[in-house]
Amino acid sequence: MQKTTAETIKGPWPSGAVLLDVRTAMEHDECRVQSDHLHIPLDQLDPDGLAAQLPGGKTTPVVILCKAGMRAQKAAERLDGAGFSNVTVVDGGLDACERCGVAVHKGRDGARDRLSLERQVRIAAGLLVVTGALLSIWVDIAFLGLSIAVGCGLVFAGITNRCGLALLLTRAPWNKSD
């Protein structure tokens, strides 16, 4: 497995290379690179199924992209473990691509607009903290544990760049692709 910079996405591509975006469907709907690419969310990535789609199978050069690089790294490890021989991760992900001027498409092509996942997490976390605080005042002090748990979850998400609440919200009915 190799790493490459976001400038690689601007091209020219290695012969026969495939760009694979492993972000969630909601994230992909919100913003994606304009160049040709495959979109397979990390939780749905089947290395053997992917190999069957690629003209060179497991020898096809695969460049993997996510938002910041963590999921792309996991996808690369999965593909490496399945015998793919030419896997590259875009260091910094789509965030780095946008910063260096890679053309991206934002929006959902005529579909209804949604709140971004980040805004949904902020709203949900805020409501949970306020609910826990009010219930601890009006019902029982033990409800303060809800506010503390949400605060700890936010700290964990900030440190690890993994958010359980975001993962739950991507599965909510209003966040499913039409």
Image: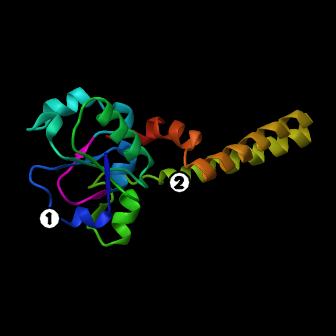
Task: Find disc 1 in the rendering and name its residue.
Answer: 12
Q: Position of residue 36 (x, y in %)?
A: 17, 54
Considering the numbered disc 2 on the image, is that residue within a helix, a strand or a loop?
helix
Task: Find disc 2 in the rendering and name its residue.
Answer: 118
Label 2 and label 1: CA atoms lie apart by 33 Å
The answer to whether mark 2 and mark 1 are in CB contact below 8 A is: no
Q: Is residue 175 left or right of residue 139?
A: left
Q: What residue is rendered at 65% in x and 46% in y?
A: 156
Residue in the foreground of this view, choosing between 14 and 85? 85
Instruction: Give the residues in magenta.
Output: 32-39
Q: Is residue 115 above or below residue 9?
A: above
Residue 117 belongs to magenta span: no
Q: Is residue 23 left or right of residue 16?
A: right
Residue in the foreground of this view, choosing between 160 and 2? 2
Q: Amino acid at mark 1?
A: Pro
Image quarter where the C terminus lies is top left
Image quarter where the N terminus lies is top left
Q: Dot 1 surroundings within 10 Å: few (below 14), some, or many (20 or more)?
A: few
Q: Position of residue 151 (x, y in %)?
A: 73, 47
Q: Is residue 78 left or right of residue 167?
A: left
Residue 109, by quadrant, is bottom left
Q: What residue is rendered at 15% in x and 38% in y?
A: 59
Q: Dot 2 surroundings within 10 Å: few (below 14), some, or many (20 or more)?
A: few
Q: Amino acid at mark 2?
A: Glu
Residue 45, by quadrant, is top left
Q: Is residue 104 above or below residue 156?
A: below
